[in-house]
């Protein structure tokens, strides 16, 4: 599929260039630059006397992007990603963890996006390094830099109130990837030939939004040190809905479903529900998530209602119940507080694990505040306290506190 899309785009681009004349130069000249820069302080402390487990980092980074103006339906775009230690804190306290630097604590500098895009009336084709916007694959910018993918996508909106997107993903970089300064093919999970996906959204019913995504490796196996090995997870499924209820203020109900078929093990399933409303100055919501039988394997964790600042380490069978409240005590200050309790359940008899996965047995409190200085800068402060149960502590899980300060400049 990738070769067909690239060939078609090359033919269209050559035809466009032959008749465009000075339009290309004008399109490039009228292109727009953007900068999303941030200074990021990260501190994670574990309740242990082993100081080497703790993490601390202070970096400055930016996403610097350029998108050309349109020329005969075509656009080109590029984004440079950089994250650099300020050398105020010993680099080795970071050790490449959490996407602030690479494994040997060196800086990150990479071309995160470089793509060609073609737009027709109700059709968009995009090929190259790009940031995706789907439930299972998105920018997931939990640290300094976003997640980017080497991909080819076709998006259609010919059906009223519906978008249909077909995609091929070859590799990724960023949070959730083994490579921070390069693109990772993730062969052990995606197989040797990457992933194909179908993503559909629909808003045909008033006040109801639907999304569904199906992702599947194009190869059932991969080669590891010359040995052919089967990919354990055969597919990734996701569906969600959000319905605006006809009472109260900003009252809504959301639900989602996700799951995997395993090659030789029991399948996994995740179900979630969320209800929210506004009372006075407070935006409130409560959510419940349950994972059944086996490990729910996803590509990123943003699709989960109860995966917050520190989130789950792995997604084993468990139940999670969370509540949250956000408010604005001042015009330019917003505050979000959340608490979630997650309790581990037993794996099924034919799963990736046995008994309980105690990484999913904790209570997490999170406060997340943002102050906006002006239309080009803001500061965000986040704190999370994650307390595991005594049974989880006995199994080796450590309570942990996580503190972050992020200063943003964007234009």
Image: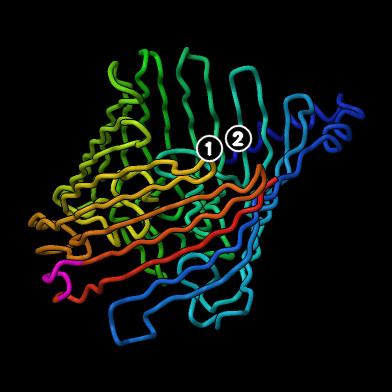
Secondary structure state at the residue bearing disc 2: helix
Q: Quadrant of the C terminus?
A: top right
Mark 1 → mark 2, Cα distance in angstroms: 6 Å
Name the residue that disc number 2 marks: 5
Magenta region: 388-393
Q: Position of residue 16 (x, y in %)?
A: 80, 27
- Viewed as shown, does residue 340 lie left or right of 138? left
Callout 2 crowding tier (Cα within 10 Å): few <14, some 14–19, many ≥20: some
Q: Position of residue 108 (x, y in %)?
A: 61, 67
Q: Quadrant of residue 286?
A: top left
Residue shown at the point (19%, 54%) measured from the top left: 341
Residue shown at the point (65%, 55%) measured from the top left: 37
Q: Foreground residue, 172 or 84?
A: 84
Magenta-colored stretch includes residue 117: no
Q: Position of residue 308 (x, y in %)?
A: 34, 53
- Viewed as shown, does residue 328 lie left or right of 267? right
Q: Quadrant of residue 60?
A: bottom right
Q: Foreground residue, 1 or 404?
A: 404
Residue 1: image tag: 1
Reply above or below: 32 against 58.
Answer: above
Asked if residue 147 can be seen in this view, the reply is: yes
Do labels 1 and 2 touch, CB within 8 Å? yes
Magenta-colored stretch includes residue 391: yes
């Amino acid at each position: 599929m990738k070769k067909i899309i690239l060939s078609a785009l090359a033919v269209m681009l050559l035809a466009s260039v032959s008749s465009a004349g000075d339009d290309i130069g004008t399109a490039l000249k009228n292109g727009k630059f953007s900068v999303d820069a941030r200074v990021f302080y990260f501190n994670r402390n574990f309740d242990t006397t082993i100081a080497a487990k703790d993490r601390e980092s202070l970096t400055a980074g930016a996403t610097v992007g350029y998108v050309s103006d349109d020329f005969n339906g075509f656009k080109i775009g590029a984004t440079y990603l950089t994250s650099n230690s300020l050398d105020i804190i010993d680099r080795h306290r970071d050790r490449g963890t959490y996407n602030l630097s690479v494994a040997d604590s060196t800086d990150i500098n990479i071309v995160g996006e470089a793509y060609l895009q073609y737009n027709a009336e109700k059709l968009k084709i995009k090929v190259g390094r790009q940031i995706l916007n789907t439930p299972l694959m998105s920018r997931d910018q939990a640290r300094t830099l976003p997640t980017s993918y080497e991909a080819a996508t076709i998006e259609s909106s010919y059906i009223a109130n519906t978008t249909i997107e077909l995609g091929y993903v070859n590799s990724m970089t960023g949070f959730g990837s083994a490579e921070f300064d390069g693109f990772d093919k993730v062969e052990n999970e995606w197989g040797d030939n990457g992933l194909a996906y179908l993503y559909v959204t629909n808003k045909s019913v008033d006040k109801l939004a639907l999304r569904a995504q199906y992702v599947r490796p194009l190869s059932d196996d991969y080669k590891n040190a010359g040995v052919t090995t089967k990919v354990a997870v055969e597919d990734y499924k996701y569906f969600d809905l959000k319905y605006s209820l006809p009472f109260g203020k900003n009252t809504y109900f959301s639900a989602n479903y996700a799951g995997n078929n395993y090659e030789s093990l029991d399948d996994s399933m995740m179900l979630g529900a969320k209800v929210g409303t506004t009372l006075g100055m407070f935006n409130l919501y409560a959510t419940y998530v349950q994972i059944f039988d086996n490990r729910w394997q996803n590509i990123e964790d943003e699709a989960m209602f109860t995966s917050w600042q520190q989130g789950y380490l792995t997604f084993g069978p468990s139940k999670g119940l969370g509540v949250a409240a956000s408010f604005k005590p001042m015009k330019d200050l917003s505050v979000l507080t959340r608490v979630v309790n997650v309790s581990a359940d037993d794996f099924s008899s034919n799963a990736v694990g046995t008994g309980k996965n105690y990484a999913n047995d904790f209570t997490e409190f999170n406060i997340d505040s943002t102050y906006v200085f002006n239309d080009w800068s803001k500061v965000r402060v986040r704190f999370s306290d994650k307390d595991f149960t005594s049974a989880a502590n006995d199994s080796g899980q450590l309570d942990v506190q996580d503190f972050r300060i992020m200063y943003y400049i964007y234009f």
